[in-house]
Amino acid sequence: MKLTTSYLGLTLDNPLVIGASPYCDNTYVARQLQDAGAAALVMRSLFEEQIDAEQRALLHHVEGSAESSPEATSYFPSYSEYQLTPDHYLRQLEHLKKSLSIPIIASLNGSRAGGWTEYARRFEAAGADAVELNLYQLVTNPAIPGDQVEADMLETVGSVAAAVKIPVAVKISPFHTSLVNFAVALENAGAKGVVLFNRFYQPDFNLEDLEVHPQLKLSDPSELLLRLRWLAIISPHVQHSLSASGGVHTAEDIVKALLAGADTVQLVSVILKNGPRFLSTLLAGLNNWLVDHGYESVDQLRGTMNLDRCPDPSAFERANYIRILQSWRV
Ligand SMILES: Cc1cc2nc3c(=O)[nH]c(=O)nc-3n(C[C@H](O)[C@H](O)[C@H](O)COP(=O)(O)O)c2cc1C
């Protein structure tokens, strides 16, 4: 069975990638993931705010400036709360590259163009095989229109892609008015792949102390459905790679993401729940499914249920929404 897949122009042994997470902080654990079958690893993100803070600190040191951003001192984590400093991150990247043979993807997380995008070049110099740029932005200011947000994001993608020769993937949220248009625009801005989607960790209210509590819940397979829909809609329209991130928990989930048009799937929650060795169970399950259903390769399966090729494209569209609502009687 040919499980190889091409992602961002890299040839991977199979479609299973470990998504951005703390896993790469520890080289021993990263090696366990490689040994269990991971085809590539994405490091945790280095954040725009973290890099800006470092650059401000340097400026402060050099110029004796008292300048500081109120944003950075109030809501955001203090510099010491980040798990890896930018320098430590680069050293860990170099260490991973020396110790492992699979591609290592370094991750930047931000939204507005600025000096922090310069770090993509440092990732490249430290040996990264690709950069994943997570465009996580939550707009709470009513004066900022949607097209401005997307224009800023595209500018950021353009500046990161122009800074490096290695491929750049962009991890986006599902909250864009015309997602296919945005995916094509990302490609035109220089992205070699799109990761669908960012997970937004929704804060909850505590009714006793009337405070807002941020929380990190691991995903469950129901989250995959949103990814399947948009992979199926976007994949006929783009040349670049697509990766499904969010809610992939079983071999069947992997098959579904590939059918919808993904080149790779990214796994985090399922590995946090079951441990690195679960990767080999997932790979065996994928292999068995392909054999049982008469496929010879992952390539043969990919995209066969996308909007252009599935037997009933209306299942993805408004018509089906109306049909589903009309099917209920009480
Ligand atoms: C503990 C933890 C840390 C994460 N850190 C990052 C990160 O630094 N950057 C990023 O882009 N995504 C990060 N993510 C999100 C994952 O990469 C992934 O998109 C998300 O968990 C959905 O995939 P899953 O359903 O397989 O968990 C993190 C997720 C978890 C659970």
Image (cartoon, helix red, strand yellow):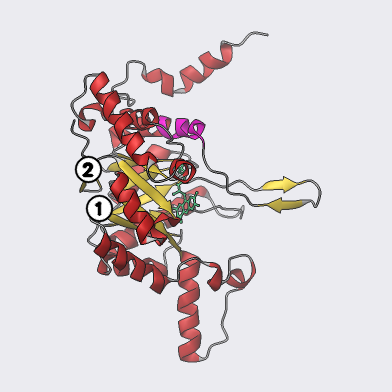
The residue that appears at 48% across and 22% down in the rendered structure is 318
**In screen coordinates, is 66 left or right of 131?**
right
Rendering quarter of residue 26: bottom left
Q: Is residue 73 above or below residue 215?
A: below
Residue at 32 percent across and 24 percent down: it is 305
Front one among 35 and 17 = 35
Instruction: Please identify the residue farthest to the top as the structure is shown.
Output: 329
The image shows residue 158 at horizontal and vertical percentages of 33, 58
Considering depth in this image, is 318 or 21 the residue closer to the camera? 21
Which quarter of the image is occupied by the N terminus? top left
Q: Judging from the image, what secondary structure is the residue with disc 1 in?
A: loop
The first of marks 2 and 1 along the sequence is 2
Magenta segment = 220-228
Magenta stretch encompasses residue 225: yes
**Which residue is the site of mark 1?**
102
Q: Amino acid at mark 2?
A: Asp
Q: Is residue 309 above or below residue 68?
A: above
- Dot 1, crowdedness within 10 Å: few (<14), some or many (≥20)? some
Residue at the disc numbered 2: 13
Give the position of the C terminus as an image quadrant.
Answer: top right
What kind of secondary structure does the magenta stretch mostly adopt? helix
**Residue at the spot 46% in from the left edge and 30% down from the top edge:** 225
Q: Residue furthest right?
A: 208
* Structural distance between the alpha carbons of marks 2 and 1: 9 Å
